[in-house]
Image (cartoon, coloured by chain):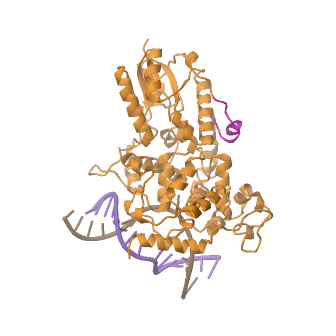
Chain colours: A orange, B brown, C purple
Amino acid sequence: MTITIWWIRRDMRLEDNRALQSAAAAGSVVPLFVIDPTFASASDARRAYMFATLRSLNEATGGVVVLRSGKPDEVLPAFAALVGASSVHMAADFSPYGRKRDEKVRVALEQSRIELVSADTPYAVRPGTVVKDDGTPLKVFTPFYKRWLGFLPEQIADAKVRFEDRRELSEGFPDIDSDVHARWPIGEDAVWARWTQWSASQLQGYNDNRNIPSIDGTSQLSAPLRFGVLHPRQLLQHLGSSEGEDHFRRELAWREFYADVLFHQPETTWVNLQTKMNVLPVDTDAAAKARFAQFCEGNTGYPIVDAGIRQMLQTGWMHNRVRMIVASFLVKDLHVPWQWGAKFFMDHLIDGDIASNNHGWQWTAGTGTDAAPFFRVFNPTSQSEKFDPTGEYLRQWIPEIADLDNSAIHAPWELGLLAPPAYPAPMVDHANERLEALSRYKSVSGK
DNA sequence: TTTTGAGTTGTTCGA
DNA sequence: GTCGAACAACTCAAA
């Protein structure tokens, strides 16, 4: 019997998994997960989620997932030789690191005459597919979206998979912080249960409710999507054409758009997409670093900003609307490089995806796709009043101000209510910093 | 090739 | 409280 390897990466599921199906079509499958040394740089929350998910996947296979530590271009050829595999099957990874890694692995396997088969992608539409009539990629979301809709994949029925039991070759699973199980649905069954429950009650009202951080208005499926516990094409199957469903489809498409942008311009992970923005003045001196450190603790004195940061520090996740408010504050009130914020988010988010995260930051900073009007500066107080009118979200994450009433909680300094005992005064004056930001952005386009 | 309309998520000010 | 205008200039997509 031919042995094949399913190299598990961002596709931690058994259902609708074309890499697994490809491996199974060619032989009896050894599922392999390589613990790459670079994972050490992932956030604690993300690593905990990943291993909890893998453990669940292992159980779903009857315990045959093999873990091996080391550099993938060394582990895969050695492991393939060990089990006598003739091919390795995977879903392509489009992150800049993933592309380099996979090319190294392909070359290394080739020397042993083992084929690396790329049989799936983490996206409904493979990055690089959606192009204009002249064959070049799109840089604006809306036209991308319209064309992307025309490429949505067909559903393919799963064939039965025969697994090969080589569990004696596996390293043990690392200990898993029990917190992650308490906080997140782990594994395919639990994640689909979450989708079923959430979509039944929230999808119709998604348009409005997704912006309210105190309610369960967003799917919270970002981490499962990040690790492929479910695939976007599966979600798309469940979406009709109501306003809420349309909007949810657009959100899925944003994930694909940013992957596409990064695929074409991998260097924009950490440098401005719009090079003209390279002359935007940013602060990087010791004082800026001190302000950044205060920001990272969730002690800016702006409740909505601090609530978001604390939510992320404590849970590994932050509500999308609040991510924008927090990012805008860092870039436009503290005037530090967006890269600092992007790194900070990647260091803590459970769902941290390099394309969505870093291009989201570029969007906020005005350096990315969508030449955002330079005057679009979020006001943290009015955003708070608009999207958390009852202050419920603020109270959940900032106990120091939990006793303030609705009229005071969004801007506790205004009534002289510098809340007991420890909530800080605003670290900067937003009205001043807004003007400062406007003048800096204006300076970029010249007079 | 040229032209035209549009571009995720905002705020402030004055009527 | 509500509403519309102003806030720049530029790039992109498509006709």
User: Residue at the location (51% across, 45% down)?
Assistant: A353
Residue A177 is covered by the magenta coloring: yes
Q: Is residue A370 above or below residue A124?
A: below
Q: Nearer the viewer, residue A361 or C13?
A: A361
- Residues A96 and A263: in front is A96
Q: Is residue A427 among the parts visible in the rendering? A: yes
Measured from the top left, where is residue A352 in percent x and y?
A: 55, 45
Image quarter in which the C terminus of chain A is found: bottom left
Residue closer to the observer: A326 or A370: A326
Asked if residue B3 is positioned above or below residue A278 in the image, the reply reads: below
Residue A388: image quadrant is bottom right
Q: Horizontal placement of A301 versus A92: left or right?
A: right
Q: Residue at x 68, y 42 (%)?
A: A183
Q: How many marks?
A: 0
Does A262 sit left or right of B14 as displayed?
left
Looking at the image, which residue sits at the far top? A1
Q: Is residue A338 above or below residue A23?
A: below
Q: Residue at x 38, y 33 (%)?
A: A103
Q: Which residues are magenta?
A: A174-187
Residue A284 drawn in magenta: no
What is the x, y in percent for residue A39?
54, 37
